[in-house]
Image (spheres, grey):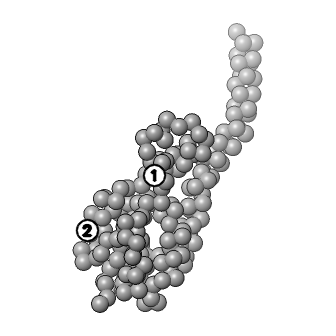
């Protein structure tokens, strides 16, 4: 018997990083992981399950952390939906590779993210997602802004210093 739609959910985040005690940690690695978690703003399983049911009423929701036999259901599915708790599926790379290896050639592969966006996962989409994930994981936008700030600040300070000197000479 074929299953029409299967939604796969899992939380790639380390439970320790999500715990309240991690907020108090001064370990730089834990602080970094909490920052990445905060930026991605992942949704909880309950929310993702409700979202999946809203989009695919007849679908089967599977949390792969709770169901050890989830792989057995993949070949029978007509459509597979990866349920990203965040916008870009941070931490889903290994699952995507495994799902692509397991599914039938005619099965459709889709993603539904925590921002209520549904999109097809083809080669181009997966490639762009991987690039965005690397940029988010290593906070490249923030690093560029920091470097620009460091480079431009002395120029502004020098300009301010020169303006003050001119102003004091006039008065």
* Res 68 → quadrant: bottom left
Location of residue 151 with respect to 39 vertically, above or below: above
Spot occupied by residue 67 in the image (x, y as percentages of width and height): 37, 70
Q: Which dot marks residue 161? A: none
**Residue 74 in the figure: left or right of residue 151:** left
Location of residue 92 with respect to 20 vertically, above or below: below
| Residue sticking out furthest to the top | 171
Residue 83 visible in the snapshot: no
Q: In the picture, which quadrant includes the N terminus?
A: bottom left
Q: Residue at x 58, y 55 (%)?
A: 137
Front residue of 79/120: it is: 79
Label 2: how many Cα within 10 Å (few below 14, some 14–19, many 20+):
few
- Which of label 2 and label 1 is nearer to you? 1
The span from disc 2 to disc 1 (Cα, nearest Å) is: 27 Å
Q: Secondary structure at mark 1?
A: helix
Front residue of 122/151: it is: 122
Spot occupied by residue 123 in the image (x, y as percentages of width and height): 54, 78
Front residue of 166/99: it is: 99
* Res 119 → quadrant: bottom left
Label 1: how many Cα within 10 Å (few below 14, some 14–19, many 20+):
few
Residue contact at pointers 2 and 1, CB within 8 angstroms: no
The earlier-in-sequence mark between 2 and 1 is 1
Spot occupied by residue 47 in the image (x, y as percentages of width and height): 31, 58
Q: Residue at x 56, y 44 (%)?
A: 30
Q: Residue at x 70, y 9 (%)?
A: 171
Residue 67 visible in the snapshot: yes
**Residue 60 in the figure: left or right of residue 82:** left
Q: Residue at x 74, y 18 (%)?
A: 166
Location of residue 62 with respect to 85 vertically, above or below: below
Total tally of numbered discs in the picture = 2
Query: Which residue in the structure is indicated by mark 1?
Result: 15
Query: Which residue in the structure is indicated by mark 2?
Result: 54
């Amino acid at each position: 018997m074929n299953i029409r739609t299967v939604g796969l959910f899992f939380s790639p985040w380390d439970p320790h990083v999500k715990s309240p005690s991690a907020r108090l940690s001064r370990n730089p690695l834990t602080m970094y992981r909490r920052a990445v978690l905060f930026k991605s703003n992942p949704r909880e399983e309950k929310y993702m399950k409700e979202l999946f049911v809203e989009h695919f009423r007849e679908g089967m929701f599977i949390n792969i952390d709770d169901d050890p036999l989830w792989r057995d259901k993949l070949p029978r599915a007509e459509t597979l939906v990866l349920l990203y708790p965040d916008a870009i599926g941070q931490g889903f790379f290994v699952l995507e590779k495994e799902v692509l290896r397991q599914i039938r050639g005619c099965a459709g592969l889709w993603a539904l993210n925590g921002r209520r966006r549904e999109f097809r996962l083809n080669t181009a989409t997966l490639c762009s997602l991987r690039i965005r994930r690397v940029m988010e994981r290593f906070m490249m936008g923030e690093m560029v802004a920091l470097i620009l700030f460091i480079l431009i600040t002395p120029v502004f300070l020098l300009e301010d210093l020169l303006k003050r000197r001119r102003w004091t000479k006039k008065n």
